[in-house]
Image (cartoon, grey):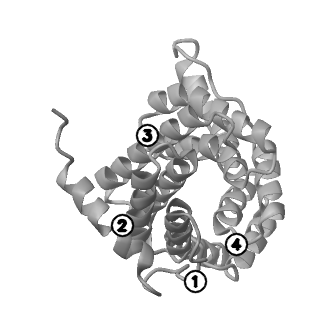
Amino acid sequence: MQPRPSIRTRLLAAAIPALLLAPGGVAGADTPANEAPTLRALNRADSAFWQMRYRTADSLYGVAMQLDPESAETLWKLARLEVSLGESLRRDMKEKRIAHYRRAVEYGRRSIALDSTSAEGHAWLAAGLGLLSEKSGTKEKLRNAEEIKRELDTALRLNPNEQTALSMLGSYYRQAAGIGWFRRMMGGTFVGKMPKGSYEEARRAFRKAITLDPRVIRNYHELALVELEMGNRKEAVQLMQAAQGKPVLFQSDRRRLRQMQRLLRKLQED
């Protein structure tokens, strides 16, 4: 006897026709009438995601998964959504953020298991791992660094212009450049590989990401922090000022803009 589907699964299945046919309720309702149901759900989910309607996007990606459970594309987009949901939460909501990052890692792993050639799958797995690692202790971060770097390298081998991977690689190099204190403290007692990276490598990764898509606020913020750590205050200020005119693409962009505004005021006061 087959197990009975969960209540969530039954409700989602019942909602599929309404979600796909509702006129104007979800961005992308002007998609062609003969479009395949899975593609229609995925396109509408993407439109909702880019409007930062994350809960609607979650429902529609769920519809796409119901229609095609073996879609590697839907899975990496779910990983992207979970990262965005986690990043949109307040910093004091640590447990909820971690739960989103864990789901991002799960979706990322499932995506590359279905399609190991997906640069996006590897990139968003690395993003989930990186953000999850940020909530761990220093030793755990360093143990996870090797897998994160491997996923980023794979993503960029598959697509040298994969922007998420470039952005995360910049953050990886920035963090690696700043762990000299831990290396000195631990000496030869740490079991595992120390991540290698420099501020110059971080700068190159962020600059390339900005060249490929000059809209992404995260890259200006992270590169500005690199410049500050390198002692380049003028360059950092210019980057943060430039970021103020960029579009908000993710809910977390608003937090980053506030952080940069506070930092700019502090720098002006000094």
Which residue in the structure is indicated by mark 3? 106
Find the distance from the CA under tag 2 to the CA under tag 1: 17 Å
Circle 4/circle 1 CB separation < 8 Å:
no
Front of the two marks 1 and 3 = 1
Residue 127 has which mark? none
Residue 135 in the image: x percent, y percent? 41, 44
Q: Would you place residue 268 above or below residue 153 in this image?
A: below
Q: What element carries label 2?
A: helix
Q: In this view, does 34 lie to the left or right of 119?
A: left
Q: What element carries label 1?
A: loop
Q: Is the C terminus in the top left, top right, bottom left or bottom right quadrant?
A: bottom right
Circle 2/circle 4 CB separation < 8 Å:
no
The disc, 2 or 4, on the residue closer to the chain's N-terminal end is: 2
Residue type at the position of mark 3: Glu
Residue type at the position of mark 2: Ile
Q: Nearer the viewer, residue 165 or 14?
A: 14
What is the residue that sits farthest to the front in this orientation? 34
Q: Is residue 90 left or right of residue 128?
A: left
Which residue in the structure is indicated by mark 2? 16
The disc, 4 or 1, on the residue closer to the chain's N-terminal end is: 1
Crowd band around label 1 with a 10 angstrom C-alpha radius: few (<14), some (14–19), many (20+): few
Which residue in the structure is indicated by mark 1? 30
Residue type at the position of mark 1: Asp
Which residue in the structure is indicated by mark 4? 240
Q: What element carries label 3?
A: helix
Q: Would you place residue 121 above or below residue 225 in this image?
A: above
Find the distance from the CA under tag 4 to the CA under tag 1: 37 Å
Find the distance from the CA under tag 1 to the CA under tag 3: 32 Å
The disc, 3 or 2, on the residue closer to the chain's N-terminal end is: 2
